C-alpha cells in the first residue's frame, strides 16, 4: 500500500495581481488547496475566493485556524513583516513575496524574533526558478565554464511604474534592483563585500522630484575579486529586457529574452524577430509554477527553502549599500 500524499491547506493574503497568479498555481496543484483569501478590498477577495472555491477571512482568523498549513503573503509590502511574524509564531509555513520589509532594521527584527520557529520561510525571488536561470546556475556550479569571474545582469522594465507606486516603493534599488542583487548572489556563490552605484532620473521629472531614479549601473565586488555588474532601466520601449550572463575561465553561459513568439520574418532587406514579452507576469509565468512546486517540496520536508529570510536580508543589505553609494559617490563596504 502506498502512502497518500497530504493535501495542504493554504491561506492567500492578498488578492491583487501577483496574488491571482499564485492563486491559479495553488489551485491547480494536486497537493494544495486554497482555504482562505484575505484582502482589505472585500469585493476583490470575494471574487478570487469564488474562483478557487475558498472562503473570505481576516488575518486573525487565518492565524488562529490550526488547519491552515501555510500562508502565501502577496499583500502590500507594509504588511509583510507583521504577517510573517504572526504566521511563523503560529507554526505555519510562509511563502512571502519580496521584500520582507523596506527597512533593514525591521527585517533584522523579524528574523531574530522568528529564528527559533520550526516552520519554514521562503522569500519569493521568482527569477531563481526560471528554468533557463536555474539550469544555468546548476551548470555554473558543475564547472561548465570554469571559475566564475564576471556576472552581468541586465534588467529593464517596459515603462516606469505609476507615481503612486513610486512614492511607497522604497526607491528603485529596494524595489526593482533587489531582484538583480539576489540574482548576482545566486550566480556568484560568494557574498559581495563592496558596492558602487551610479544612477539618474531620465524618464520623468515627477520621479526625479520624488528623489528616485530610473536608470542605474551597480557594480558588486567579492573578496576574491569576482565582479557582478547590474544594468537597470525603467524604460525599454521594445519590451521586458531580462538577460543574465556568467563569464568564467573556460567560457560563458547566458540567458536570452523570451520573445512573444518564435516567428521569424526573413526578407532580402533583413531578418525580423518578435519583441520580448511585455512584462514580468508573462515572462516569469513558468518560473512562478516552479516556485510553487518548490514550496510544496519544502512542505513535504524533502528540501529546505532555496531562498530563505537570510537571502531576503542580504539582498536588501546590498540595496542599502547601493543607496549610500549613489548618495556619496563612493564605493561602499557592505555592512
Image (spheres, rainbow, N blue to C red):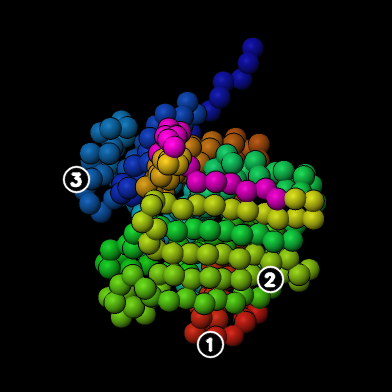
Find out whether the residues at labels 1 and 3 contact each other: C-beta distance under 8 Å. Answer: no
Q: Disc 1 versus disc 3: distance between alpha carbons?
A: 46 Å
Quarter occupied by the N terminus: top right
- The residue that label 3 is drawn on is 43
Q: Nearer the viewer, mark 3 or mark 2?
A: 2
Instruction: Determine the secondary structure under disc 2.
Output: strand
Lower position in the chain sequence, tag 3 or tag 2: 3
Residue 236 is situated, as x and y percent measured from the top left of the image, at: 39, 58
Q: Which mark is residue 328?
A: 1
Disc 2 residue crowd, few under 14, some 14–19, many 20+, Cα 10 Å: many
Quarter occupied by the C terminus: bottom right
Residue 26 is situated, as x and y percent measured from the top left of the image, at: 43, 35
Q: In the image, is residue 44 above or below residue 176?
A: above
Tell me which residue sits at (57%, 39%) in the image. Answer: 131
Could you tell me if residue 69 is visible in this image? Answer: no
Could you tell me if residue 138 is visible in this image? Answer: yes
Range of magenta residues? 252-268
Q: Quadrant of residue 44?
A: top left
- The residue that label 2 is drawn on is 221
Residue 96 is situated, as x and y percent measured from the top left of the image, at: 47, 52
Residue 221 is situated, as x and y percent measured from the top left of the image, at: 68, 71
Instruction: Determine the secondary structure under disc 1.
Output: helix
Disc 3 residue crowd, few under 14, some 14–19, many 20+, Cα 10 Å: few
Q: Residue furthest left?
A: 43
Tell me which residue sits at (29%, 77%) in the image. Answer: 205
Amino acid at each position: 500500500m502506498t502512502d497518500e500524499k497530504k493535501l495542504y491547506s493554504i491561506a492567500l493574503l492578498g488578492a491583487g495581481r501577483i496574488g491571482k497568479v499564485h492563486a491559479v498555481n495553488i489551485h491547480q496543484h494536486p497537493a494544495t488547496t486554497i482555504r482562505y483569501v484575505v484582502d482589505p478590498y472585500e469585493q476583490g477577495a470575494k471574487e478570487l475566493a469564488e474562483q478557487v472555491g475558498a472562503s473570505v477571512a481576516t488575518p486573525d482568523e487565518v492565524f488562529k485556524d490550526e488547519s491552515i498549513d501555510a500562508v502565501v503573503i502577496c499583500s502590500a509590502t507594509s504588511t509583510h513583516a507583521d504577517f510573517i511574524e504572526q504566521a511563523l509564531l503560529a507554526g505555519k509555513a510562509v511563502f512571502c513575496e519580496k521584500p520582507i520589509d523596506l527597512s533593514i532594521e525591521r527585517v533584522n527584527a523579524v528574523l531574530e524574533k522568528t529564528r527559533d520557529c520550526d516552520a519554514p520561510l521562503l522569500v519569493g525571488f521568482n527569477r531563481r526558478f526560471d528554468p533557463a536561470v536555474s539550469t544555468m546556475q546548476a551548470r555554473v556550479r558543475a564547472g561548465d565554464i570554469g571559475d566564475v569571474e564576471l556576472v552581468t545582469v541586465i534588467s529593464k522594465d517596459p515603462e516606469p511604474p505609476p507615481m503612486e507606486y513610486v512614492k511607497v516603493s522604497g526607491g528603485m534599488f529596494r524595489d526593482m534592483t533587489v531582484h538583480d542583487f539576489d540574482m548576482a548572489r545566486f550566480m556568484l556563490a560568494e557574498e559581495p563585500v563592496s558596492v558602487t552605484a551610479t544612477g539618474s532620473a531620465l524618464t520623468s521629472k515627477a520621479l526625479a522630484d520624488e528623489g528616485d531614479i530610473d536608470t542605474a549601473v551597480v557594480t558588486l565586488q567579492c573578496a576574491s575579486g569576482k565582479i557582478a555588474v547590474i544594468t537597470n532601466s525603467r524604460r525599454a520601449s521594445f519590451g521586458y529586457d531580462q538577460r543574465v550572463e556568467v563569464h568564467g575561465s573556460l567560457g560563458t553561459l547566458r540567458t536570452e529574452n523570451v520573445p512573444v513568439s518564435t516567428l521569424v520574418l526573413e526578407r532580402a532587406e533583413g531578418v525580423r524577430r518578435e519583441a520580448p514579452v511585455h512584462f514580468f507576469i508573462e515572462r516569469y509565468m513558468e518560473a512562478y509554477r516552479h516556485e510553487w512546486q518548490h514550496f510544496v517540496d519544502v512542505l513535504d520536508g524533502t528540501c529546505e527553502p532555496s531562498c530563505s529570510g537570510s537571502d531576503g536580508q542580504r539582498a536588501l543589505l546590498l540595496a542599502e549599500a547601493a543607496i549610500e553609494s549613489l548618495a556619496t559617490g563612493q564605493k561602499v563596504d557592505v555592512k
